[in-house]
């Protein structure tokens, strides 16, 4: 029997700010072997407790813009005045090594991935239970002024309009259930025939024809 691993699968998870996507993805990475989260580059300053190369790859705005000009990013976006991006070579290397990779990116980033890697990403949109719940979560974090919260809510209203562009939609009304539903999606995608070819072809070859 062959032990060759198939090339990794690429998953995109998008959600409005405050939906809990970071917590969801942290749980997924803890629970699913071989699933790794892409580490984004950002021009924003480090927050207390953040570690360069662990939470993000922190670079200057000038350096980030130079990387954009050089075509290094698979996707990038200006989010509330800070630049965030995913370096394409990082993703290609992880996938080639057989890792499944999850990108936590916004709607505009997902569209760039769709354009640059057509048909390669499995896209999942995480919705909050309602606008009211999202607003309550954002205010409950007690870290943003009301003006910033209003801006995030306006952005969320625009982002949810893109939900039909995605392959799957999950509602984060209860964390464990949300994580479980995405786990099921990942398991199903891992079992697709095209992804299992490197494993199953040698097995099939052992049977008489």
Image (tube, helix red, strand yellow):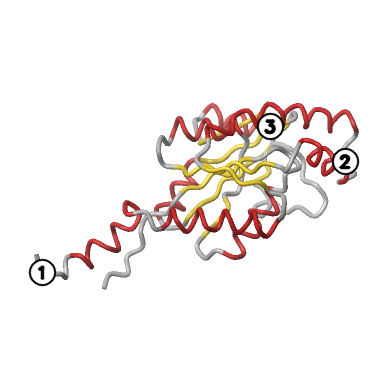
Q: For the residue labelled by badge 1, is the local secondary structure a helix, a strand or a loop?
A: loop
Name the residue: 66% across, 40% down.
Answer: 15
The answer to whether residue 116 is left or right of residue 87 is left
For disc 3, the marked residue is 61
Mark 3 residue crowding within 10 angstroms, few (<14) / some (14–19) / many (20+): some
In the rendered structure, which disc, 3 or 2, sits on the residue that comes first in sequence?
Answer: 3
- Lateral position of residue 158 relative to residue 116, left or right: right
For residue 199, what is the image quadrant? Answer: bottom left
Proximity of marks 1 and 3: CB atoms separated by less than 8 Å:
no
Read off the residue under disc 2.
139
Viewer-proximal residue among 103 and 39: 103
Q: Which mark is residue 92?
A: none
**Which residue is disc 1 drawn over?**
208
Q: Disc 3 on helix, strand or loop?
A: helix
Q: Residue at x 55, y 35 (%)?
A: 110
Q: Find residue 36 and report its horizontal and vertical position in percent.
A: 55, 56
């Amino acid at each position: 029997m062959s032990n060759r691993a198939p090339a990794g699968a690429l998953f995109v998870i998008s959600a409005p700010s405050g939906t809990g996507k970071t917590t969801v993805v942290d749980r997924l990475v803890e629970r699913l072997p071989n699933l790794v989260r892409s580490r984004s580059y950002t021009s924003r300053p480090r927050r207390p407790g953040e570690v360069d190369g662990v939470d993000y790859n922190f670079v200057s705005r000038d350096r980030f813009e130079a990387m954009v000009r050089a075509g290094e990013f698979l996707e990038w976006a200006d989010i509330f005045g800070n630049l965030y991006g995913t370096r394409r070579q990082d993703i290609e290397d992880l996938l080639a090594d057989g890792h499944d990779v999850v990108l936590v990116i916004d709607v505009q980033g997902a569209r760039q991935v769709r354009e640059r890697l057509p048909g390669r990403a499995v896209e999942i949109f995480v919705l909050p239970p309602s606008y009211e719940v999202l607003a309550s979560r954002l205010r409950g974090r007690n870290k943003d002024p009301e003006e910033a919260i209003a801006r995030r809510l306006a952005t969320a209203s625009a982002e949810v309009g893109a939900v039909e562009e995605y392959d799957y939609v999950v509602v984060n009304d209860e964390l464990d259930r949300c994580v479980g539903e995405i786990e099921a999606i990942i398991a199903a995608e891992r079992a697709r025939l095209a992804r299992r070819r490197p494993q199953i072809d040698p097995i099939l070859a052992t049977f008489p024809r």
